[in-house]
Image (cartoon, helix red, strand yellow):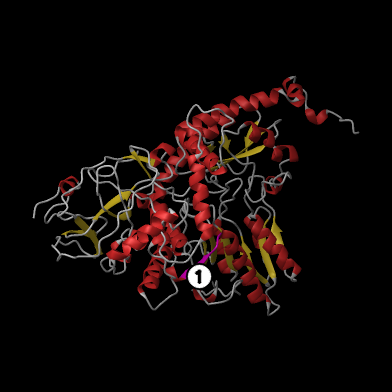
Amino acid sequence: MGTSRTQEQAGINGGQRLDAQNCEMEAVEADAPKTLVGYSTISRHDTIDDLYIPIQRPSPPPPHQTVRLAVRRNLGPKELKRAPSAAPRPIEPIAVPDLPESYHRVPEPTCPSMTNLLTWSSSPPPKFASSSLVSGFARRILVLATASICNPTIMTSTIASCALRSAGRVSLSSGSRVTMAPLRGMARAAVVARRTSRRGYVTETKRDNAQVETAIKLDKSAFSNIPPPGAPSNAKVSPMAEVLKQAAVMDEGQRPIYLDMQATTPVDPRVLDAMMPFYVGAYGNPHSRTHAYGWESEKAVEDAREHIAKLIGADSKEIIFTSGATESNNMSIKGVARFFGRSGKKKHIITTQTEHKCVLDSCRHLQDEGFEVTYLPVQNNGLIRMEDLEAAIRPETALVSVMTVNNEIGVIQPIEEIGKLCRSKKIFFHTDAAQAVGKIPLDVNAMNIDLMSISSHKIYGPKGIGACYVRRRPRVRLDPLITGGGQERGLRSGTLAPSLVAGFGEACRIAKLEMSYDTKRIKYLSDRLLNGLLSMEHTTQNGAHDSFYPGCVNVSFAYVEGESLLMALKDIALSSGSACTSASLEPSYVLRALGNSDESAHSSIRFGIGRFTTEAEIDYVLKAVQERVTFLRELSPLWELVQEGIDLNTIQWSQH
């Protein structure tokens, strides 16, 4: 039989093999309606206008020549084979209602039940503007649509009920896919199509879901109410439309420059690619051992565990997944203290005054339970004295907890020396390495670390997932905080989220691979920023100048309130301290521990530099900070006195 015009334009003929993510598409000539397969590339970086796709109205094909594309899963590439003709029941055409003359509306993906439907006939799908931040999975969503074109003026489409499941599975890597049989029940598509046209979205069951339908209708209505360019400012705009407008404005480059990498980091696009399959196709419980869905999720979890272990020089069996570094810190400190404190002989803990809030609060809770805690002071550069640590150790000391990189001033503590001392005294050593893992080289064996807290969202991974390294030899015993199903060696029960774990593992893999390059680049940008800031008069860097992570720069601007400077720098996302305590107007306890005055602590700003920071952004920040610090100082009467050479310490201020 001859090849139809639509076949030729779609690049499909006789025995041609199409490879879409290691899946085969078999072209079958049969007396069936026409099914087309396409890729939807709509992403968060496409503008609102991109949601309308121009299409061509094709001429109707000969009634005896129609094509059905069946998708079947295959682990290896094979040549297309001509399948026997199938004769499903005829499908009733359904007209697409209320469309503009030359556009086919693509529904906004407002819930998991919707797919980005892209139907074309005489030409391949249009290409969207590419972006480095567009998820590869978003470009690979496979959409199956059954169309019956009866006349040149009506475009019809129906959707198979298994489209969502197929779209998710074919996007998986070949090593983690499960077997998928060819699509069945093509005749059933007619019923699904009728419901689709009535509901406005794809449903896989007959259950009524009024809430989802209502939300979708509201979102569609909101999208429709977006005023066109040039519309008056008082035009009706729904909340959803306002969000879309803001997203479009932000994509045009009007978002603030992000320099708050110690609070969180953006998700690396490669990490997002690794996560997306587990939201659609690989949705199995990783603890289910009786079917392939559980096996593939379990494999992804174990692969991620291996990547995390390699990053810190550990064994994969020593990695315990948690919800984040805060839980890991609580589990390490409270778990070890309570396990060894039951005997009454090991009820002493040592930490520092500049630890993260969750470490200090954990120690205070243990004090309420009868434990003794020693809070070591730090020098004015933020480093502890090894002599103070050694003097604080007692026979009843169970644990020493010192963070690797400080989250406010970036100071790197002498972790290797601390670990060596603790090992010689047979004391467990815990370190909060949330700001260090993936940024500086770490080896738990070389540094004699027994417990380590790790966070995913500090290294360009997803939020809500972290890990705790727990040494096996010599074995560290601790009481679990969360009990239940016995997951994670019984130390942290609860079902893991494979998507978050996979993203965490991918973030660690990338960090290990690119650490050398990232370190050099961030050091260059940090030096550029620091030299420019310190060139201003009456500015000082907080913390050790020769032992700090370059991506964390903390500077005090004398005679300027830090909060006022932050308000003046609304075009730059900065912080005056820890994100966990930045809501408080109290001066930073970390800077107070360094010996800074309240005025100096209040005038400090933290600059965070990361993988995606550019040199142009650093130059812009330097110029903006210099201009606005100068402006704010000119408003201060203290600055005028300083300019006149008056020592403010000699002034006797009157009290009211």
Q: Position of residue 128 (x, y in %)?
A: 34, 40
Q: Position of residue 105 (x, y in %)?
A: 38, 44
Q: Position of residue 377 (x, y in %)?
A: 69, 53
Is residue 638 depicted above or below 136 in this figure? above
Q: Quadrant of the N terminus?
A: bottom left
Q: Quadrant of the C terminus?
A: top right
Towards the viewer: 393 or 277: 277
437 is within the stretch colored magenta: no
Q: Position of residue 267 (x, y in %)?
A: 46, 49
Residue depicted at 47% across the width and 57% down the height: 442
Towards the viewer: 11 or 455: 11
Quarter of the image holding residue 452? bottom right
Instruction: Bin the neighbour count of mark 1 within 10 Å (Cα to Cα): few under 14, some 14-19, many 20 and up.
Output: some
* Type of the residue with mark 1: Thr
On screen, residue 451 versus residue 158, left or right, reads right
On screen, residue 271 versus residue 598, left or right, reads left
Q: Give the labeled residue for mark 1.
A: 495
Is residue 450 depicted above or below 339 in this figure? above
Q: Which residues are magenta?
A: 318-324
On screen, residue 463 versus residue 101, left or right, reads right
